[in-house]
Structures are given as structure tokens and as C-alpha cells.
Image: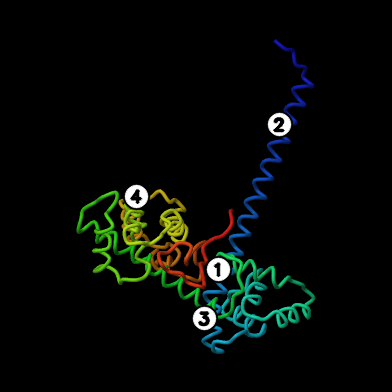
Amino acid sequence: MFNVSPEAWNLLAKVGLATACATTVALLVALMRRSARREKRLAIRTYARRVGRFLRTRYGLQENYTPAQVQGMIKEWGYSTGYDQYGLAMYCDAAAFMNHYRATGRRYNYELLRGEISRCLFRADMTFSVSDVIEVSAQSKKKRLAIHCYIKQLGPALRQRYGVQRKYTPAQVKQTVSYSCSRSDDDCYALALYCDAADFVDYHSLIGEACDYKAMRSEIAHSFHPIFQGSTTFDACEVIDRSDRLDNAKDESDGRSWWSNLLDFESGSDLSSGGSATSCNNDFSSGSDIDYGSD
């Protein structure tokens, strides 16, 4: 057996401590960067969902808005963050944007900001207009309301008609949607919630539609994070059980139902909407505002 001097042990201990410290620091930095990316995405989506609607209501739908109009609306409604430059890049033209920040002594790359906005809202690098932003926000809200209905109302209706099951057939889900929720172009999300992958794929192959089961469940899980905690492995029984628990849960801070909080688009969630990347036969030119990149 090797004899190790006390000095060697001390050196090894110091190396181990230094390694542990470096690992901890790296982890903290990664978490901070992830948090910053999340905050930025949430800010961008807030500017798209809320500020765009208020701008259109007050000033009408315009090709571009002035920096004063955009910044005034952001501050008036309390949406100002450290990322307000993204709001201005979203709704102002390049010349107005650069002149505004040149006067304040700050410089931002307009095209770089627009690229980030495009990937966040449309999941692609594309040239977008103010009307594109407003349209994708409207589609986002419509889809979120539909999924909310599928979780809150469709699950209990399926249980009442067919009993408690870990999965339901596409036929059972479609029939139940017809009377428990308003029909929409997003019914494919109901199938993603309550059917298994094999039945989902077989059904859409039969009707000639291409849908991504995993992507849709990921979108649901992250859009309604308080319910699914980001997990995509849920089955129909779990969806209904979690829906039941939320029906009785109250937010201790204000006494509102958690369902009300889930539909509070002001705070939103990390992911929300979807376009051609995840939905069935919904080739919206405005695309999707699903999360992009990795955390």
C-alpha cells in the first residue's frame, strides 16, 4: 500500500475543494444565464401580447409606431423591464429606433434584436411586420384558451362518459370535444393530451394530417407549467387528476382560482402558442412563439 504524506493529502483536499468551488460557480452562472434568457423571452412575449393590443386600440393598426408611442405604452401599463429595447425593435422601424437610442447615448443592434424576436415569436429567422406580431399573438391566445378548455372541461367529461382510463381513443376524444368544448382548429391538442402516441399517429395518418406528438405535448407541458411542471410523460388519468386538484386550489396571495392565474397572459408562461411547427394543417405564416433554443 502506498504511503501518502500529510502534505500530499492536504494538496489533494485543496484540489478537491477548488474543483467543487469551480463546479458550483459554473452551475450558478448557468442558472443565472438561463434565468436571464427566460426573463427576456417573457418580456418579448409580453410586448407582443399586451403592448401590441394596446397600441392598436389607442393608435389604430399602423405599419410602424413611434418610439414615444411604444415606450409610453410600455411604461403606462407597467410592462417596463430591462428589455424594453426589444419592444421598440418590435414596433418601430430601424431609423426611428436608432435615432431614439442615439439620443439617449445607448446603442443596440436593431437587426440582432429583430432576429431574437423572430426566433422567439415565430420560431424562425424571418422578416416580420407589426401586423404579423399582432396576428401571432391572437393565434397564441386562441390556442391557449382551447388547451385550457381541454384540460379543465374535456378530461372530466371523458371520465364521466368512459370511466377512468390512462388513455382514450381518438374517437372518444373527438366525440367528447364536440359537446364539452367549442370545436376549433386546435382539436389535435386534445388528442395529444388524452391519447397515446401510437393511436395519435395512426389517427392522423388515416386522415392525412402530419402532427408532431412529442412537440405538442412539450408545448402543452411548458405552456401550462403549474399543472405539468414541464413533464411530457403524463397520461390521461394524470391530466384529469391534476385538473381536479386545481379546481379546488386557490392562490393564497389573492384567493383567485389557479385557473384564473393560468389564463393571466400578463405573467404568462415560458411557452405558449404554436403554428405550423406543432399544429395540424395550421400553416400560419406567423408561425409560433414556442420556446426556441436550449436552456
Would residue 103 appear left or right of 144 to someone viewing this image?
Answer: right
Mark in the foreground, 2 or 3? 3
Q: Are marks 4 and 1 in contact (CB under 8 Å)?
A: no
Name the amino acid type tagged 1: Leu
Dot 3: few (<14), some (14–19), or many (≥20) neighbours within 10 Å?
A: some
User: Which residue position is annotated with label 1?
Assistant: 121
Mark 2 falls on what kind of element? helix
The x, y position of residue 256, in whole percent, is: 39, 67
Task: Tell how many labels.
Answer: 4
The disc label shown at residue 16, or none: 2
User: Considering the numbered disc 1 on the image, is that residue within a helix, a strand or a loop?
Assistant: helix
Mark before the other along the chain sequence, 1 or 3 = 3
Q: Residues within 10 Å of mark 4 (few under 14, many from 20)?
A: few
Label 3 and label 4: CA atoms lie apart by: 40 Å
The residue beneath circle 3 is: 53
Query: Is 241 placed above or below 13 here?
Result: below
| Residue type for callout 3 | Arg
Numbered disc in front, either 3 or 4: 4
Q: Amino acid at mark 2?
A: Gly
Residue 13 on image: x %, y %: 72, 28
> Disc 4 residue type?
Ala
Residue at the (47%, 58%) spot, across then down: 222
Q: Which label's residue is closer to the chain start, 4 or 2?
A: 2
Residue that mark 4 sits on = 198
